Amino acid sequence: MSDYEVVVIGALDEWRSHHGGFDEARSRDGRRVVDHELTMQYMGLTANALAPGEQAGYWHVHSRIEELYVFLEGRGQMALDDDIVDVGAGTVVRVGQGVARTWRAVPDSTGELRWLCIRAGGEHLPHLPDDSVRLPERPMPWTL
């Protein structure tokens, strides 16, 4: 058996119906901790949706984990230490260790703020993925 798994998290407009968190005390509507459903070793993933005017309601900081926020829809703001950054579809924010962060969907957003948060830690990534090997002898699987 190959080492892969597939989970369907649904279309963006379905994300608000998710209810989840890292534990019951931190669970909320609009969050799905995908790495609790897949066997992930070096990274984590949450799918998130906030209604206009809704906010995280807490700050947090990591000592070992780096996070990448990929915003897909809606309009919002992230507070990063003493700065406030506007976010929306197409915005990608990397947050390193030691940076306090929180976020909200702005009240006048025309729809939900939806984003993926990718968490990773461990070793530094090489500039080029130096563990990859091309397989030129393997034919492509699709037919025309």
Image: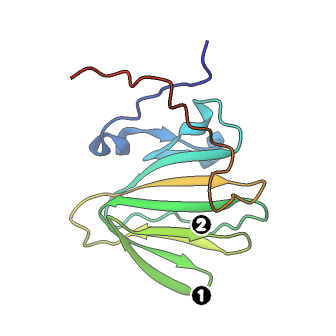
Which-is-in-front pick, marks 2 and 1? 1
Q: With 92 as the anchor, is 74 left or right in this view?
A: left
Closer-to-camera residue (24/85)? 85
Q: Earlier in the sequence, mark 2 or mark 1?
A: 2
CB contact under 8 Å: marks 2 and 1: no
- Which of 106/86 is in front? 86
Q: Which mark is residue 9?
A: none
User: Does residue 124 appear to the left or right of 54 in the view shown?
Assistant: right
Look at the image and tell me in which quarter the N terminus lies: top right
Please tell me which residue is depicted at 36% across the width and 43% down the height of the picture: 15
Q: Amino acid at mark 2?
A: Tyr
| Quadrant of res 16 | top left
Please tell me whether mark 2 sits on a helix, a strand or a loop: loop
Locate residue 94 relative to residue 15 in the image: left or right: right
Instruction: Find numbered disc 1 in the image and state the secondary structure of the residue it sits on.
Output: loop
Amino acid type indicated by mark 1: Asp
Q: Position of residue 75 (x, y in %)?
A: 32, 69
Instruction: Identify whether 11 is placed above or below 111.
Output: above
Q: Residue at x 39, y 69 (%)?
A: 91
Circle number at residue 82: 1
Towards the viewer: 31 or 3: 3
- How far separated are the C-alphas under marks 2 and 1? 15 Å
Residue 40's x, y, as percent? 65, 36
Circle on res. 58: 2
72 is higher (above) or lower (below) than 81? above
Point 59% across, 66% down: residue: 58
Q: Residues within 10 Å of mark 2 (few under 14, many from 20)?
A: few
User: Residue 103 at what x, y percent from top left?
Assistant: 49, 69
Count of picture labels = 2
